[in-house]
Image: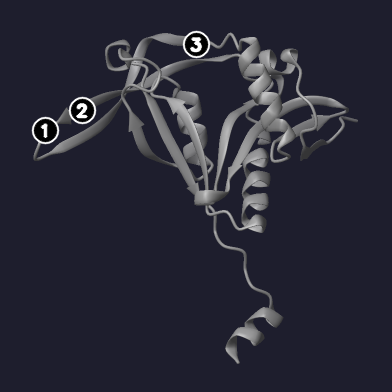
Amino acid sequence: MTDPVRIRTLRGLSSADVAELVGGYTSGTRYDVLWSDRRDRVAFALRRVRLRTPYRKFFPHPAEELRRYRHVVRLGWSVGAYQGGRLIGLALAEPRAWNRSVWIWELGVAASHRRQGVGMRLVGELTRRARKAGFRTLVCETQTTNGPALEFYRRAGFRLEGVDVSYYSNEDLRTGEVAVFMKKRVPPARKGPSARRRTSR
């Protein structure tokens, strides 16, 4: 009998976990970005295109980045998916109280467990925690070249709300790898019957 997958607070993070779960992606689609910046009119447009050759991206995760990830884990908002003691998925998350947002810095699932709803459960748990704490939105950043991530986040209830044409370098438009920001609105927690009675007096 297969052990169930359980979602709980992430307590630690190894370099091997990061390499396995968020080491890169392969995409058959991308968004081309059209940008016009004039005095009287600024316009952004994104057009989804299919690629003849899949785009492959690998993330090296240097030591400085691993230290930052471990700091994020210590904040207590990151969650992991575990099966039989093995970490098979993670979502590294950081709260920002000033605008009541929760930023998802990384979200990944082991190749052996993809398309089984694990990623959706991780997002669901973050949504539940954000609602309980009074946060209003989940935010993530990904690339126009990362078709699988863009499609996943859309299915999870995110919308593409921002574009930064020089987030990674001054040549992002030329290289075709442009940063996009997606958000999922967090519905407010429902008030219980006793709370409704108090506010109606």
Look at 45% across and 30% down and name the residue there: 150
Seen from the viewer's position, the closer of residues 200 and 71 is 71
Residue 149 in view, yes or no: yes
Callout in the foreground (1, 2): 1
Distance between mark 1 and mark 2 Cα atoms: 10 Å
Question: How would you rate the neighbour count of disc 2 (Cα within 10 Å): few for under 14, some for 14-19, many for 20 or more?
Answer: some
Residue under label 3, please give it. Answer: 57
Q: What residue type is labelled 2?
A: Trp
The kind of residue on which mark 1 rests is: Arg
| Foreground of the two, 134 or 161 | 134
Left or right, 85 with reference to 136: right
- Viewer-proximal residue, 103 or 85? 103
Q: Which tag is nearer the camera, tag 2 or tag 3? A: 2
Residues tagged 2 and 3 counted as in contact (Cβ below 8 A): no
The N terminus appears in which quarter of the rendering? top right
**Quick one: label 2 or label 3, which is nearer the N terminus?**
2
Q: Residue furthest front?
A: 98
Disc 2 designates what residue? Answer: 35
In the figure, is residue 86 to the left or right of 113? right
Task: Using the numbered discs, state the Cα–Cα distance from disc 3 to disc 1 in whole angstroms.
Answer: 33 Å
Specify which label sits upstream in the sequence, 3 or 1: 1
Image disc number at residue 38: 1
